[in-house]
Amino acid sequence: MTTDLSVRIGDLILRNPILTASGTFGYASEYETMVDFNKIGGVITKGISPEPRLGNTQPRIWETESGLINAIGLDNVGVKDFEQSKLDYLREIDCAVVVNFFAESTEGYATLAHTLGAMAGVDALEANISCPNVKAGGREFGVDPAAAADVTSASRESTNCPLIVKLSPDVSNIGDIASAVADAGADAITVANSMPAMAIDIDSRRPRLSFGRGGLTGPAMRPIVTRLVYESAQATDIPIIASGGASTWRDVVEFMLAGASAVQAGTVNFVNPRASVEMAEGLETYCRQCGINSLEQLVGAVNMP
């Protein structure tokens, strides 16, 4: 028996539900000798901004007992250099290419969505809305339903490319945000970005990171993201992509039972570069052994009390 592992995100069809998370996989070429791209659903690039960014100074990563805290500062080559120096390679790999992007204003998101969405070889876009809105005193777009909807709507109107919106976990009701961006035109949502966190050196009494605080990722995030995925699935019918703490195929199944249609491999890439491939292979074996013909039999199938 074969299992249909394909997933639809807007007009994009992934061969299987495994994606690599933005910020953990570079621009894909860094993993060329370690990952069989034709065995995963797709790669999500490092976040792209209108102009190049250097990011924060070192140290900007601190390992925790069950993950890591990072304050990279969204460093990237910028949209112009991305098209000139990164996109040719991405066009040649045998999986979907999703470009993560961000800006400092609603207009900036719209412009970047239009530019990136028009590039040959870009199969979908992922808008990172966990960024400060400089026109609103630095408040993140992703923590306010109205602001999140505005960014989504502006991006949607600027491109026909499948649009994924990456949500923040640091909200009181993620269902409100999920519903708002779905109504504004998102084809799917990623749940979720990193959780604000901090670590302090007790000898120097200084933060471990040069920026002072950062975002927690890795296995410690998985139970939190599982809840957020479940709550998002209760609020909207668009596909949900789980991101946060997946390390094995079992984690993939757990996220799917909670309501995810696809799952991103993130921090685990630093520990096991082949994790995404192993997740896809393990999921296929699990489905075959359990007599599952389609992933629709798994998505949201948790038996709640």
Image: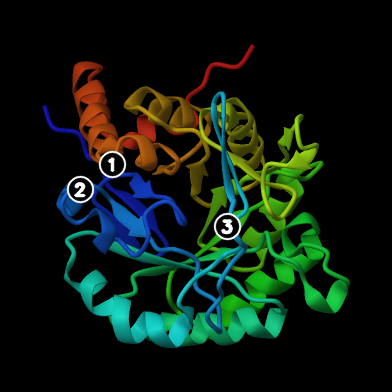
Mark 1 crowdedness (10 Å alpha carbons): few <14, some 14-19, many ≥20:
some
Q: Nearer the viewer, mark 1 or mark 3?
A: 3
Residue reaching furthest front?
Answer: 203
Reply above or below: 103 against 287.
below
The image quadrant where one finds the N terminus is: top left
Q: Which residue was labeled with disc 2?
A: 35
Q: Position of residue 213 (x, y in %)?
A: 73, 47
Residue drawn at 23 percent across, 79 percent down:
88
The image quadrant where one finds the C terminus is: top right
**Type of the residue with mark 1:** Pro
**Disc 2 from disc 3: Cα separation:** 24 Å
**Disc 1 from disc 2: Cα separation:** 7 Å
Q: Choose the circle earlier in sequence order: 2 or 3.
A: 2
Q: Nearer the viewer, mark 2 or mark 3?
A: 3
Residue drawn at 28 percent across, 41 percent down:
273
Residue reaching furthest left?
Answer: 1
**Residue 237 seen in the current view:** no
The one of 299 and 65 positioned closer to us in this rendering = 65
Numbered-mark total: 3
Q: Position of residue 62 (x, y in %)?
A: 58, 40
Reply above or below: 77 against 182.
below
Q: Which residue was labeled with disc 3?
A: 72
Residue reaching furthest right?
Answer: 137
Q: Which mark is residue 273?
A: 1
